[in-house]
């Protein structure tokens, strides 16, 4: 049962990651200005707002949150390596973020009747006192996303080491996997910084 949940959690995570590839690319484009961001968003929306895709993504988000919490309680924190603790903590924050963020987007679309475009997200990151919450909220969500991805990457890679009998080869591979993991974290920090620069009015007035 536990292995089935883990496998489905991983598969739903891949589906969400494909969406996030478009979503974060869209956010990075905001470095060129709000209008460019909106133009690219309208293009990408043909993909992820196609109703079967949107239903699938929302289902994956719900399953990610529920299965993630289940796996956390099953695994626990006691006597776990640091990368597992980071994976768990980042996953818990991402669960909170997905619930809050998806709820806000759906309310914006169906209750408040506003376009959930660049200004929907950027406005709250530029108004006092709202920005005191939303700047850390957005920043931490991005950092946790890349921390979670890097930990999963490391765990998946090191699973192969159990099959390697030569100790020297295993040590070399472990060092390689650590470098890859650190590289994902560094790339994530850079992407986070660039997106927050675009959304907090550093380059242009919002």
Image (spheres, rainbow, N blue to C red):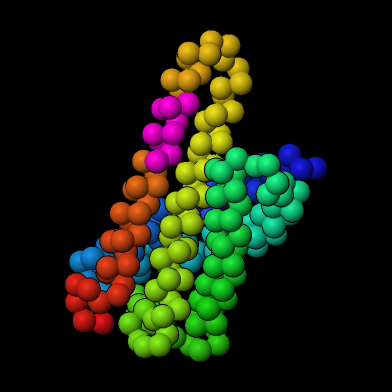
Quadrant (top left, top right, bottom left, bottom right) of the C terminus: bottom left
**Left or right side of 20 for 41:** left
Confirm whether residue 43 shows in the render. no
Q: Nearer the viewer, residue 168 or 58?
A: 168
Identify the residue at image location x=46%, y=22%: 173
Identify the residue at image location x=27%, y=68%: 197
Image position, residue 188 (x, y; %): 37, 52
Identify the residue at image location x=59%, y=28%: 159
Name of the residue lying farthest toward the front: 79
Q: Quadrant of residue 142?
A: bottom left
Image position, residue 68 (x, y; %): 66, 54
Identify the residue at image location x=47%, y=14%: 169
Image position, residue 162 (x, y; %): 61, 21
Quadrant (top left, top right, bottom left, bottom right) of the N terminus: top right
Query: Start and end of the magenta stretch?
Result: 174-182
Image position, residue 22 (x, y; %): 39, 57
Tell whether position 179 is magenta. Answer: yes
Q: Nearer the viewer, residue 110 or 144?
A: 144
SS assignment for the magenta stretch, majority: helix
Tell whether position 187 is magenta. Answer: no
Confirm whether residue 179 shows in the render. yes
Image vertical order of residue 110 relative to residue 35, above or below: below
Image vertical order of residue 158 relative to residue 67, above or below: above
- All told, the count of numbered labels is 0
**Left or right side of 29 for 21:** right
């Amino acid at each position: 049962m536990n292995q089935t949940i883990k496998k489905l959690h991983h598969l739903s995570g891949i589906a969400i990651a494909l969406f996030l590839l478009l979503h974060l690319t869209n956010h990075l484009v905001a470095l060129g200005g709000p209008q460019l961001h909106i133009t690219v968003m309208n293009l990408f929306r043909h993909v992820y707002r196609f109703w079967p895709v949107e239903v699938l993504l929302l289902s994956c988000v719900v399953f990610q949150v529920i299965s993630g919490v289940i796996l956390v309680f099953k695994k626990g924190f006691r006597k776990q390596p640091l990368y597992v603790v980071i994976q768990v903590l980042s996953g818990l924050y991402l669960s909170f973020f997905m619930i809050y963020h998806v709820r806000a987007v759906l309310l914006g679309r169906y209750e408040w009747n506003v376009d959930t475009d660049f200004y929907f997200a950027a406005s709250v990151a530029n108004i006092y006192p709202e920005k005191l919450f939303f700047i850390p909220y957005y920043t931490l969500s991005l950092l946790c996303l890349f921390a979670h991805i890097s930990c999963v990457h490391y765990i998946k890679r090191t699973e192969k080491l159990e099959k390697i009998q030569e100790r020297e080869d295993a040590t070399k591979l472990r060092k390689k996997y650590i470098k890859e993991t650190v590289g994902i974290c560094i790339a994530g920090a850079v992407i986070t910084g660039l997106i927050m620069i675009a959304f907090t009015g550093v380059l242009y007035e919002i």
